Image: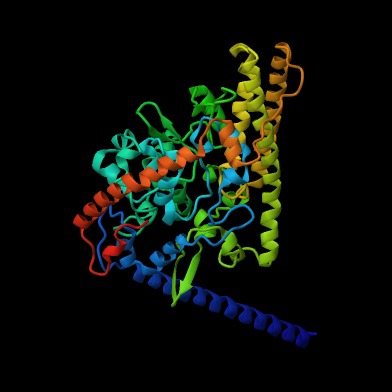
Amino acid sequence: MNQQNKKSGNSSMGWILFLSTLVGVAIVGFLITSVMERRGEAKQAKMTNPIGEWEPRNEVWGANFPREYETWKKTEETDFKSAHGGSAKTDYLEEFPKLVVLWAGYGFSKAYEQGRGHAYAVEDIRETYRTNAGMPATCWTCKSTDVPRVMNEVGVAEYYDASWFDRGDQIVNAIGCQDCHDPKNMNLRISRPALAEAFAARGDDINEATHQEMRSLVCAQCHVEYYFQKEPAKYLKFPWDKGFSAEAMEAYYDELGFTDWTHKLSRAPMLKAQHPDYELYMTGVHGQRGVSCSDCHMPYKNEGGAKFTDHHVQSPLNNIANSCQVCHRESEATLMTDVYSRQNKVMELRGIVEDLLAKAHIEAKAAWDAGATEAEMKASLTHIRHAQWRWDWVAAANGAGFHAPNTALQVLGTAIEKAGAARHEIARVLWKHGITDPIEMPDISTKEKAQRYIGLDPDEMEETKAKHREELFPVWDEKAAARQEAMGLPANVSDKKAISY
């Protein structure tokens, strides 16, 4: 018995030594890997050419950080199209003509396209018909690395309080390095004041954010809901004072009495959601587990023994191996199916709301035409306002609801209820004014038919844009080139790259 116990004890001791050795080897391996990665990152952060505090030219940053710059340039690629997104140019008004009716009287009824990569930010806002008649200068805020430079030169409030045309020759470098990095040490930093101001209004200090939190917050400078205040004029503000949900923002706007525009058909006081990606993401499982935007859209990669962040900001569906499969062990096909199954459900409810809202706007117009009063229409117009806001809160966010499918479906469900309530109230008004048959719907089966129905002339919009291309944009570019030439270039940066769109 004693010999058996002795053998058993020796066996246990052997296992303990074996497992201890394995743990020790793993720890040493981890430390070696960590040291090598840190050395690699430190080597990357060593600049060959110092970068100015407000340097907007991505090429100048790229001279110091060629790996990051070369991957950033891949945002010029437009060859990936997923079921509901990607980098390919997509005309959403052609794909969903009812949107023209939903935005009648607002710029988005003129043009609404899938955003291409960051490299096209300046080019695309120049080209959209939405800027034909000008916009506030605030609309440039998330399009260019030139914005922090101009804000520093003229003041934040003064930057906002100008027209889109006033800043055209100043804003020429596309979204890039300056927007997210401190040139002194390459740490992530907030370059747009609205996010820091929104944190402060809630009693939070953005300077206390961790590095992992900053890997999302630099994106949240722009991928959020926002509006322009009347005082100070056109000042950019996030409606976060009551919370981040669609319902909380709706209550905020209602209390403020804020409207983006009055609908041309229904005369409803409307709200236009921008792209509340960050707010929706925070309610989803990835946000709640601390996964950052960069983890999925800009995952780390290795090249030549160096670890760095892939600056090809894109859909994770075009890079599943480096994004999704870092955590999920399923095959690419399975992961793709999981994403599409959630997005398809969101898109199905989106379509139902769009159909209900288009009918509600057209039926409300019929009620006005029949002699309805403002008192009779008030309840239905409030329902339309809330239904479209909630639909837009989901629809305007990137990812077709995938950042938080449960939240997206819940918000769209309430939008369906409110759109139905609006149509019920309008039917009562129509009945009161002697209209008892259903309102005949116009042919809005294509973008052009829908635009002409609400009074837009596609040919006229193109003529105006063509004139800008011929007469206005070359003047902007000439002034910008002269300014940037005076700034000088490092020896290893070509003149041909001085403007990066």
The answer to whether residue 140 is left or right of residue 94 is left
Residue at x 60% of width, y 62% of height: 324
Q: Is residue 210 above or below residue 310?
A: above
Q: Quadrant of residue 152?
A: top left
The answer to whether residue 344 is left or right of residue 321 is right
Q: Is residue 333 above or below residue 449?
A: below
Estimate the x, y position of residue 184 in percent, counting from the top left.
29, 58
The answer to whether residue 451 is left or right of residue 490 is right
Residue that lies at the very extreme toward the left in this rendered image: 486
Q: Quadrant of residue 192?
A: top left
Residue at x 46% of width, y 50% of height: 219
Estimate the x, y position of residue 34 in percent, counting from the top left.
46, 71
Residue 240 appears in the rendering: no
Q: Nearer the viewer, residue 281 or 412?
A: 412
Q: Quadrant of the N terminus?
A: bottom right
Count of marks placed on residues: 0
Q: Nearer the viewer, residue 134 or 454?
A: 454
Residue at x 52% of width, y 30% of height: 105
Residue 303 appears in the rendering: yes
Estimate the x, y position of residue 59 in percent, counting from the top left.
32, 62
Q: How is the image coloured?
A: rainbow
Q: Is residue 201 above or below residue 141?
A: above
Q: Quadrant of the C terminus?
A: bottom left
Q: Is residue 300 above or below residue 475?
A: below
Estimate the x, y position of residue 88 in percent, counting from the top left.
54, 56
Residue that lies at the very extreme toward the bottom in this rendered image: 3
Q: Nearer the viewer, residue 93 or 199?
A: 93
